[in-house]
Image (cartoon, grey):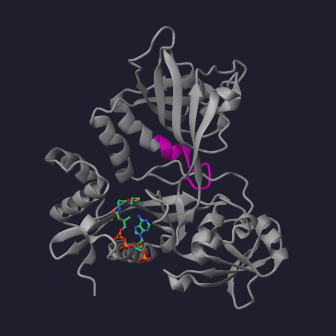
Amino acid sequence: MPDFAVRVLTEDAEIRAAHSVLRVALHSPPLSDSDWESTRPTYAPKRYFGAFAGDVAVGSTYIYDAEIAVPGGRTLPMSGLSRVGVRADYRRRGVLTELMRFQFADARSNGQVLSTLHASETGIYGRFGYGIGTFSRELQLFRPRFRADVPRSGHVRMLSSEEVLAQIQPLYKRIGLYRPGMMSRGRDWWAVQVDNAMRGGEPYLVAVHTGLDGEDDGYVVYRAIPDESYVGTDFGATIEVWDLNGVNQGARNDLWRFLVELDLVKDIRAHARPVDEPVGLLLEDPRSCMTRNIDDEAWVRLVDVLAALEARTYGNAGPVAVAVDDAFLPENSGTYLISRDGVTKTSAQPHLTMDVATLGSVYFGAWPPSTLAGTGRIGVHDPAALARADQLFRIDSIPWCGTGF
Ligand SMILES: CC(=O)SCCNC(=O)CCNC(=O)[C@H](O)C(C)(C)COP(=O)(O)OP(=O)(O)OC[C@H]1O[C@@H](n2cnc3c(N)ncnc32)[C@H](O)[C@@H]1OP(=O)(O)O
């Protein structure tokens, strides 16, 4: 029997204790009273799970409740796993494993079909059934010049900091989940990511795009980092783009134009952008937009495999029977007959075999099944079925989450 127990945290004192565990696990400075005052509102009721050994907090896990867009356009309830930390003197004693069991049971009871997370280390989450679901790209635009012939589709205005808190949250909702993998953002997410940062004096600036129909349809959140050390003509600030979304390509183009045409700027950096975002094509010299990194972004776990498979759409190909092995949630294990007309459990012989973490990578189209089969992640019992699986899981739009948590 473990000498700790996992429970939903409701009392301020235990939430604070678990949050302190998290901070130490992430090597952040100890929690001060003023930190706590700003942190407390970022915990939605009953979404913080803690492991306690008697009265001592030893583990922390928080859930963001959200909706996620899946290939084909439907949205599904998901749980966003975050704030995972275990006290150093309790590590490798199964605390995270018990927190995982608890949060999957919670997700199931809430009808949350998928779970996603952003991993601090890639070695942690595969054993719990998570696979890399989306990738993102880190960009650097060096002395970019915007092409004069890119059509305009509206205008851009800057918000005051008071306007930001009131306007940006509904605007993100109005823009919608325009790529598979994008997720909704609840009050608790905005509280952590924007309100605290702006109230805490972070120099974020926000510009909003208004379309030709007069409706606000895009925004960018960014900050300028001045270069104190320039010599000669090599002057200019670095612009760091934190969040940029628009309802369509035209709105996003205008927001990039706004950033590129800012004065006294040397370079623009943007983390976690879609891998196929055509920023370079907007510039006179496409090579002035460099890819600094391609990173694994959202890790995806199918909590309810049948419901998740039923929710996405499939390409035009004959059916494929896929045997799924789920060691952590064995009720998901079984063979699924996947066709463009629907998905059912079957007792037929499988054409392909994969574990549930690999299915997490197939689901949003991070890789085609044949690529994963080529690396030994998928067992192939009928080679003809592999080409059909590629066609079934084909995607029209490259997935991207775009929301860090
Ligand atoms: C989504 C997010 O929030 S990302 C942030 C994650 N948090 C951190 O990185 C903070 C620092 N790390 C920690 O707090 C802890 O080490 C944790 C949370 C990663 C792991 O917690 P633990 O309670 O030690 O995990 P637990 O004992 O349940 O380990 C389960 C298994 O995972 C393995 N494992 C745990 N952590 C790691 C790791 N970082 N790398 C590789 N394997 C790991 C264990 O060896 C064990 O394997 P086994 O079943 O073969 O024996």
In the image, residue 51 above or below residue 120: below
Give the residue drawn at x 74%, y 67%.
Answer: 374
Image location of residue 233, percent across then percent down = 51, 9
Relative to residue 223, is residue 327 drawn left or right?
A: right
Image location of residue 164, percent across then percent down = 39, 34
Was residue 348 drawn as part of the magenta stretch in this picture?
no
Which quadrant of the frame does ligand 1 lie within?
Answer: bottom left
Relative to residue 154, is residue 170 drawn left or right?
A: left
Residue nearer the viewer, 34 or 42? 34
Was residue 178 drawn as part of the magenta stretch in this picture?
yes
In the image, residue 304 above or below residue 403: below
Quadrant position of residue 160 = top left
Give the residue drawn at x 40%, y 77%.
Answer: 101
Quadrant position of residue 385 = bottom right
Image location of residue 327, percent across then percent down = 52, 82
For the N terminus, give its image quadrant.
Answer: bottom left
Quadrant position of residue 254 = top right
- Bounds of the magenta segment: 171-182
Relative to residue 370, is residue 34 drawn left or right?
A: left
